Amino acid sequence: MIEVQGLTKLYGSFPAVRGIAFHVARGEIFGLLGPNGAGKTSTISMLIGLSRISAGAVRIAGYDATREMPRIQRDIGVVPDESNLYDELEGLENLCFSGALYGMTRKRREQRAAELLDQFGLQAVGSKPFKTYSKGMKRKLTIAAALMHEPSILFLDEPTSGIDVASARQIRQNLKDMNERGTTIFLTTHYIEEAGRLCDRIALMVEGRIVRIGTPDELMSACQREHIIEITTAGPLAGVAGELAKVFSHVRVRVTGESTLRLQTDHASGVGPFVVWLHERGVPVVEATLIRPTLEDAFVALTSVDLAEMKRERERNS
């Protein structure tokens, strides 16, 4: 649905986006994850026709973005990082106005607006002016407006930035629901948890470059330099840990509690041999768990971005 090759954006001599390439499959939720200033908004602005492409090629739904953007815009919905709706209009009126811009008949746009107010839980405020809405309500109505003409691709720039937890949770569920109905979704975010929960694949973007693309599992595996097994036993481990380390010489053994230990190895290893060995020595195993890196661990390892600074940025945007 989206094909990008060598995409570049220059502001004067400054390269905000530096020759990036990726593709988005039909029915996929694809996320562009990175800190503020990484080039995410510049990228999405070029994809939706709000910003001129300095270099590179973009095709959306088979159409050339440099020559056929008016045709593309009929098939896409766009949710900017700031709402583009009208404060004085009621929620229902804003949706109907958005539908009119796409040439929908009055009957169809009123029907569709009612459907979306119900879908986003906004029926109770549909007749109230947009300016009276909370941040979360405004965000939900802005997404609803982008869906009025039932686009095949939805673009969202920081969909849950600065809104309350309950509204963010509902928006993520709404996005999953519409994706299950066939909508392809492209989103930018600097929330690692959000990317991990929502996206089928994620592109990590830093300083205008994409440093890695993959599923959340692939990204986590890519940064796993050692394999860790955590074992909890039914009895004390006194004297057993040292013997285990001698028998399994390729494994680093660390006792972390009276009845818990961690085994670290540079190569993938199942838990079976260790469980059997301990059982044979009269130390029953209660639990044996493979410890995997988190998406946050992967993000830091693959981008070298300071997570503390990203969290401060999030607080400033809240």
Image: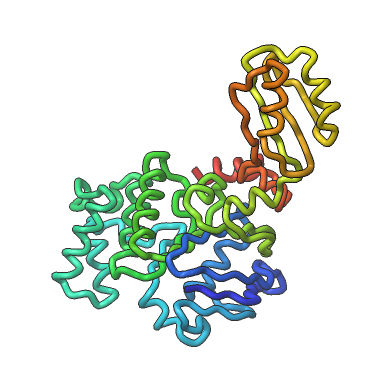
Give the residue furthest to the front: 280
Pick the front one: 317 or 167: 167
Colouring scheme applied when the structure was drawn: rainbow
Give the residue furthest to the left: 107
Would residue 80 appear left or right of 174 to someone viewing this image? right
Residue 294 lies in quadrant: top right
Pick the front one: 42 or 176: 176
* Residue 276 position in % (x across, y down): 68, 27
Residue 164 lies in quadrant: top left
* Residue 245 position in % (x across, y down): 82, 26
Q: Is residue 195 above or below residue 227?
A: below
Q: Residue at x 47, y 82 (%)?
A: 62
Pick the front one: 25 or 41: 25
Q: Residue at x 63, y 79 (%)?
A: 54
Total marks shown come to 0
Q: Is residue 175 visible?
A: yes
Pick the front one: 53 or 89: 53
Q: Is residue 50 visible?
A: no
* Residue 303 position in % (x across, y down): 71, 52
Residue 242 lies in quadrant: top right
Would residue 306 appear left or right of 77 to someone viewing this image? right
Q: Residue at x 30, y 51 (%)?
A: 131
Q: Is residue 272 above or below residue 147?
A: above
Q: Residue at x 70, y 21 (%)?
A: 280
* Residue 151 position in % (x across, y down): 35, 70
Give the residue furthest to the bottom: 67
